[in-house]
Amino acid sequence: DAGVTQSPTHLIKTRGQHVTLRCSPISGHKSVSWYQQVLGQGPQFIFQYYEKEERGRGNFPDRFSARQFPNYSSELNVNALLLGDSALYLCASSLFARTNTEAFFGQGTRLTVV
Amino acid sequence: AQTVTQSQPEMSVQEAETVTLSCTYDTSENNYYLFWYKQPPSRQMILVIRQEAYKQQNATENRFSVNFQKAAKSFSLKISDSQLGDTAMYFCAFMKHEWGDDKIIFGKGTRLHILP
């Protein structure tokens, strides 16, 4: 079975531009979460989506938005990029069940803003 | 708000030795999960071990075990017979035991080097 897949793996953008990152969860997983990992830090929660609805949002500006599609894949959008948005963006999927708490992570998208 | 603190930014041990990584957390919740994740240079975040707060017994997974002290809000990871492949960043993490909340709160990590 394929794990969580993210695309692209790397990209470079210029300040002020917009970026879209994509995530495909493990088959059968309905919950997708996004994290930002700045170099040398632990991941920080950005969003959680379940059944196409936002279930949680971290302390990030409105420039960050996301959505989930009927096939449970997800996109993270960041507008008006700043240098400080340079980070590894991780996507995690889970079954979203009371008795199953394991989140499976993708390999991330390395975003560099210049 | 919950916080997770890892006080050891970096550690090095010889292969086959035992190493313990420290973690403390702060929460007002009574039911929650604690995790240790491993992130090798490949960037893939891998779950090493999970502890449910209502369980008093410490979790073990092969060479990995935890010392969970709920009252002290301490959750350390012990790696026995360390191997070169254990070299990675290790993150301690917290999640509320609440349906509908998948948010994981991570510490800043400990970089572990296993030396040949």
Image: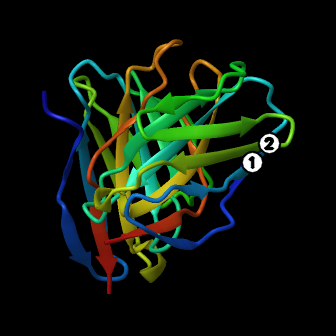
- The chain containing the residue under callout 1 comes to B
Residue B1: % across, % down: 78, 45
Residue bearing the label numbered 2: B73
Q: Residue pushed farthest left?
A: A1
Label drawn at residue A47:
none
Q: Quadrant of the C terminus of chain B?
A: bottom left
Contact, mark 1 vs mark 2 (Cβ under 8 Å): yes
Looking at the image, which is closer to me, B69 or A4?
B69
Please determine whether, in this image, residue B73 is positioned above or below residue A89: above
Q: CA distance from mark 1 to mark 2?
A: 6 Å
Q: Nearer the viewer, residue B72 or A64?
A: B72
Say which residue appears at 41% left-offset and 72% top-offset.
A80
For residue A26, side relative to residue B67 (left or right): left
Residue B56 picture location, percent across and down: 72, 22
What secondary structure is found at the residue carrying circle 1? strand
Q: Amino acid at mark 1?
A: Tyr
Tag on residue B25?
Answer: 1
- Badge 1 local density, few (<14 within 10 Å), some, or many (20+)? many
Residue A52, quarter of the rendered image: top left
Up-down relation of residue A93 to residue A10 (above or below): above
Residue B67 falls in which quadrant of the image?
top right
Secondary structure under tag 2 reads loop
Which residue lies at the image location 30% right of the left edge and 45% below the top edge? A75
Amino acid type assigned to the residue bearing label 2 in the image: Lys
Which callout, 1 or 2, points at the residue further toward the start of the chain? 1
Q: Is residue B85 left or right of residue B94?
A: left
Check chain identity for marks 1 and 2: say if they share one. Answer: yes
User: Percent position (x, y) of residue A113?
Assistant: 33, 80
User: Is A98 or B41 nearer to us in this picture?
Assistant: B41
